[in-house]
Image: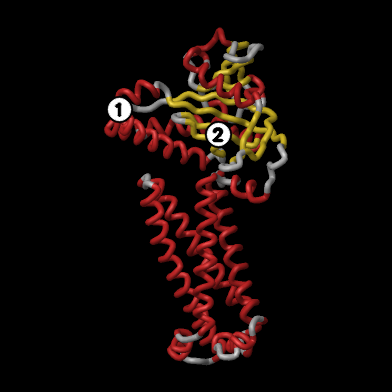
Amino acid sequence: MVNYYQYKTWKSLFHTLITWILAVQLFRLIRLVGITEYESDSMVTSIFKQTMFDHSLLITTIIGAAVGVLFWLNQYIFKKVERKYMMCYANSLIYRGVSFLTAVIIAIVLSLIILAVAATHYNNVGLVDVISIFIFDKTILVFSLYILVWATIINLIAQIKDKLGPGVFFHLMTGKYQIPKEEDRIFMFIDLNNSTQLAEKLGHLKYSQMLQEYYRDLTDSIFKYGAEVYQYVGDEVVLTWKTKEGLKKANFIRLFFDFQDKIKQKAQVYTDKYGVVPSFKAGANMGLVTVAEVGIIKKEIAYHSDVLNTASRLMYKCQELHEKFLITEKLAKAIPSLVYVNLGSVPLKGKSKEVNVCAIRTLKQLQANTSKVIVPSGQLKQA
């Protein structure tokens, strides 16, 4: 079964391949029906037009696919390295720049090799002769510059997308939320426990380093279960899903326990580095929210609704009720196989009416995918 992270990985590869195949096809069309005066003294263009026209679509598709895979691998490896070593922004830019230029050079060389092999095969010309022609051919120079320009544009867009978050760049570019819209969403607020005491104990520098590693471990779970990061607020993270995606296989609950397991697995690492093992609490809610593009100097996509306020209040209520994960009864009932402890009506700060609250303590019943089990608050030990 392909998980969400694998799905996004393959989707990213597909999009990169299509982008580069179309880019190289555009260059092919320009050279074949472009400026004849410039083409007349180009041996490469002459080869394509006279004897390789029937095969040029296949050849350029192969080139586009090969270059696409190369640049996708470059981005994939870069993100892995960046997350592993938690590089600062300056080092990240340097590494990205070096890897980008290396990929461009390899892409050009790879393209020339494919063209040379094709020219040799279809024209009965020696490989050495073809290479010597290619080295001084104007079309090759133009093609190399073309790859550089396209790669620069795509790399720039990738950096902007990383900065804004998945999906946000597209929405801002298309103006999807310039007019506010309603969406049905799940929101989860995750907060580090005892953050003030930890900051005092570790000092602000050490605490910030721990927080970076903590967020990095959370990112693995975010990718795995398809969450969108809405906001980082100090030691608090706000995650969101479209309701259908969040309820599918109970992704938002699985994320919570997956992150919990991740911290447990790295308990010794955290202890050795920081002398403590971080723990966290969470609150979640679902319902209609208004989505709108806000800001003039700095634009972002913002969500407005009491859904967020309730989820946030539930997160802070965890400490008072000695629970780790609280959700609304409405959200609990939306997952048929979920085990939860019904805590009844609970007053939340800032809300005039009490909210029916449930505590999530286990993933066992959910993994078994059996019928719903509701545990009354008087039988907490059975949960």
On the image, numbered disc 2 is attached to which residue?
239
Disc 1 is placed on an element classified as helix
Distance in Å between CA atoms under marks 2 and 1: 27 Å
Q: Nearer the viewer, residue 270 or 149?
A: 149
- Residue at left 39%, top 33%? 211
Q: Which residue in the rendered view is the most extreme toward the top? A: 378
On the image, numbered disc 1 is attached to which residue?
202
Disc 2 is placed on an element classified as strand
Q: Are marks 2 and 1 in contact (CB under 8 Å)?
A: no
Which callout, 2 or 1, points at the residue further toward the start of the chain?
1
Which amino acid lies under the numbered mark 2 shown in the image of this protein?
Answer: Leu
Q: Is residue 295 above or below residue 57?
A: above
Identify the image quadrant of the N terminus: top right
Q: Quadrant of residue 12?
A: bottom right
Q: Position of residue 351 (x, y in %)?
A: 63, 14
Which amino acid lies under the numbered mark 1 shown in the image of this protein?
Answer: Leu
Q: Is residue 377 above or below residue 273?
A: above
